[in-house]
């Protein structure tokens, strides 16, 4: 927070502004690295990016603000075990210029949670892994859905796919929930979800007393 408004939300549950910018295709990795170097002197990564002429101030601000809202949703959609106030003066690389009022951010986050809960099929963005049904790609009406089908191997959650696709957690979670309702995806059974594990689902069982 800065001056009473939220300027950034950093959560491991959702892609940050850097991921969203790079995945947009407007900025390449080499340009991002160059902007980081140049921003050391200007102290503004946004200014360095805009100075390259490949992205506008409005585009950067839109993506940064999107990341703030998505990060807040990611926090609220998970479980919060404890809260710690950190007085660190470290500044986010790309803060939202005007910030987002806390009550506005909370209201929008609540709206997103309610919208997700209202869908016919409940979906946890962190626990439920999904798998595409046979012929799902042919039933997809958009490129976004086809991308999701391609990543729906039964090993990825909505959170995993958001990072893989470089898209926000909330829109990806909603789209997956809708695709479940449309019969294009299914919640993967444990045997599929944990097939990548060396020991399978049994590895998650509590150990016997005295086990080293």
Image: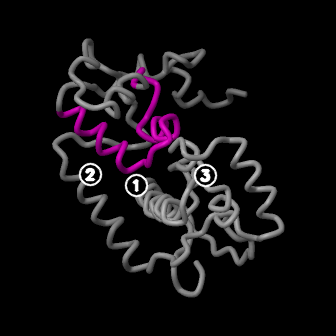
Q: Position of residue 62 (x, y in %)?
A: 46, 62
- Residue 57 is inside the magenta segment: no
Q: Residue at x 79, y 60 (%)?
A: 38
Q: Is residue 75 visible?
A: no
Question: Who comes first in sequence, dot 2 or dot 3?
Answer: 3
- Residue 167 is inside the magenta segment: yes
- Pointers 2 and 1 in contact (CB under 8 A)? yes
The quadrant of the rendering that contains the N terminus is: bottom right
Q: Position of residue 159 (x, y in %)?
A: 46, 41
CA distance separating discs 2 and 3: 26 Å
Q: Position of residue 55 (x, y in %)?
A: 56, 55
What secondary structure is marked by label 1? helix
Frontmost of labels 2 and 3 is 3
| Figure check: 156 above or below 87 | above
Judging by the rendered image, the residue that carries numbered circle 1 is 77
Count residues near mark 3 (Cα–Cα under 10 Å), then give few for <14, some for 14-19, many for 20+: some
Judging by the rendered image, the residue that carries numbered circle 3 is 18
Number of the label disc, if any, that sits on residue 116: 2
Q: Position of residue 127 (x, y in %)?
A: 42, 38
- Quick one: 181 or 205, which is closer to the camera? 181
- Quick one: 112 or 100, which is closer to the camera? 100
Question: Magenta segment range?
Answer: 152-181
């Amino acid at each position: 927070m800065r001056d009473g408004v939220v300027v950034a939300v950093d959560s491991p549950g959702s892609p940050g502004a850097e991921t969203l910018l790079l995945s947009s295709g407007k900025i390449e990795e080499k340009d991002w690295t160059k902007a980081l170097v140049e921003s050391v002197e200007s102290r503004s990564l946004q200014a360095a990016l805009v100075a390259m002429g490949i992205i506008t101030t409005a585009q950067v601000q839109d993506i940064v603000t999107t990341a703030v809202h998505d990060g807040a949703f990611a926090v609220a959609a998970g479980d919060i075990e404890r809260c710690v106030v950190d007085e660190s003066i470290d500044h986010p690389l790309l803060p939202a210029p005007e910030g987002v009022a806390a009550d506005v951010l909370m209201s929008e986050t609540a709206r997103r949670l309610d919208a997700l809960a209202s869908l016919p099929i409940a979906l946890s963005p962190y626990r439920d892994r999904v798998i595409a049904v046979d012929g799902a790609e042919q039933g997809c009406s958009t490129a976004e859905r086809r991308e999701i089908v391609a990543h729906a191997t039964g090993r990825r959650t909505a959170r995993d796919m958001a990072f893989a696709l470089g898209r926000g957690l909330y829109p990806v979670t909603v789209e997956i929930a809708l695709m479940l309702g449309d019969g294009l995806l299914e919640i993967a059974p444990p045997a599929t979800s944990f097939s990548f594990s060396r020991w399978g689902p049994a590895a998650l069982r509590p150990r016997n007393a005295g086990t080293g």
